[in-house]
Amino acid sequence: MILQANSVSLIRANRHLVNKAKLHVDEGELVGLIGPNGAGKSSLLNLLAGLLPCDAGDVALTGENIATMNAARRSRLLAWVAQSGPVNWPLSVERIITLGRRPHMGPWQRLTAEDTHAIEGAITATDCESLRHQDATTLSGGERTRMLLARALAAQPRILLADEPVAALDLKHQLQTMRVLREFATGNRACVVVLHDLSLAARYCDRLYLMHEGKMVANGLPLEVLNRANLKDVYEVEVEFGGGDTPWIVPVREV
């Protein structure tokens, strides 16, 4: 098991944004976090990344408590792609992607052949070649997301946490990004991704966790979690299913 959340809670203004949530991720898994707006998905991802302290419970990364883990070690093991991550530095896209290698480099160290290979692989995987020399502050929302994903991939972490990485992307790059995440989550690596597109969640994820009002209300194989009863209770919609090997889920009416 590479990542585990043990009954974690996050409380703000006397409200449980995350309420005793349990989650585990094994090596080789792409795990999806789904649920309506305000369900607690992004808050939980912040706890998993160690960006916020748990008000109860704990998070273990490769068996170590993430709250007490050395920051340098954590940055080599885990990479984070924030939701609509801002970019305020007038640097080239290539330069920002290169920053993903900082956890593996000493002070004033030059890029090695290994670093360059990782950077070029990340640029290719995220279709950032045409953006390489562009000022990062001029990018569209979707281009910025691809760049930040490339920066995370360049770090070559064991686990990748991605918060709605396809939300701002066009159709082609949605599929491309999900394929990249699927290919990343192999061997001793794993990925946790927050998704609103349930069809993509059903098609690409190994397992899903469904959140509602800060709590985990279902988890398991995608088509076990994405049943009509769960979606009606949590999303307050009725849905239609289809697609066979490439499943799709479409909301058809409110309830």
Image: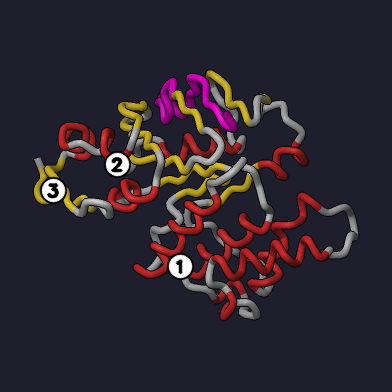
* Image spot of residue 159 (x, y percent): 59, 42
Picture disc at residue 142? 1
In this view, the residue in front, 173 or 203, is 203
Question: Which kind of residue does numbered mark 1 sit on?
Answer: Gly
Residue 233, picture quadrant:
top left
Label 3 to label 2: alpha-carbon separation:
18 Å
Q: Is residue 239 magenta?
A: no
Image quarter in which the N terminus is found:
top right
Tell me the element at label 1: helix
| Of 209 and 88, the residue lying toward us | 209
Q: Which residue is mark 2?
A: 36
Classified by dominant secondary structure, the portion drawn in magenta counts as strand
User: How many other residues sit within 10 Å of disc 3, few (<14), some (14-19) or many (≥20)?
Assistant: few
As for residue 11 lying within the magenta part, the answer is: yes
Q: Amino acid at mark 2?
A: Pro
Amino acid under disc 3 = Glu
Residue 157: image x %, image y %? 66, 47
Which residue was labeled with disc 3? 240
Of label 1 and label 3, which has the lower sequence position? 1
Q: Is residue 52 left or right of residue 114?
A: left
Q: Determine the residue positioned at 31% across, 39% down.
A: 222
* Mark number, residue 191: none
Quadrant for residue 22, please give it.
top left
Name the front one of labels 1 and 3: 3
Nearer-N-terminus badge (2/1): 2
Q: Which residues are magenta?
A: 1-21
